[in-house]
Amino acid sequence: MADRWHVEVDRDLCIGSGMCVGGAPEEFRLDAARRSHPVAPDREPSEEVLDAAESCPVEAISITLAETGEPVFPPED
């Protein structure tokens, strides 16, 4: 079984562009303040979630391995 992911959106960075919601409408929502949040922060790995994180214009979405905290996106340099 693959490691589970933990998905976070940095609300201070999020500009409410909606790119994540447009690309992964089942995975992200915009709240009343137009800030994104994941529907399920702890989840199975998903190409759709990774694509949404990669499409964020301000890189407000981070994905880590839930058990270890190791970064999935953005990758460590």
Image (cartoon, rainbow, N blue to C red):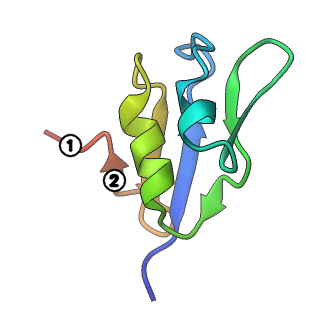
Secondary structure state at the residue bearing disc 2: strand
In-front residue for pair 69/43: 43
Residue farthest toward the right in the current orientation of the protein: 32
Looking at the rendered structure, which numbered label has been put on residue 50? none
Judged left or right of residue 12, residue 48 is: left
- The residue beneath circle 1 is 76
Q: Quadrant of residue 42?
A: bottom right
Look at the image and tell me in which quarter the N terminus lies.
bottom left
Q: Amino acid at mark 1?
A: Glu
Could you tell me which residue is drawn at 40 percent across and 25 percent down? 59
Could you tell me which residue is drawn at 55 percent across and 70 percent down? 44
Rendered position, 17 above or below 63: above
Instruction: Kindly report the distance in space between the C-alpha atoms of the residues bearing marks 1 and 2.
Output: 8 Å
Rendered position, 7 above or below 54: below
Q: Quadrant of residue 16?
A: top right
Rendered position, 38 above or below 55: below
Looking at the rendered structure, which numbered label has been put on residue 72? 2
Look at the image and tell me in which quarter the C terminus lies.
top left
Residue farthest toward the bottom in the current orientation of the protein: 1
Could you tell me which residue is drawn at 61 percent across and 65 percent down? 43
Q: Amino acid at mark 2?
A: Val
Residue 41, percent from left and from top: 66, 52
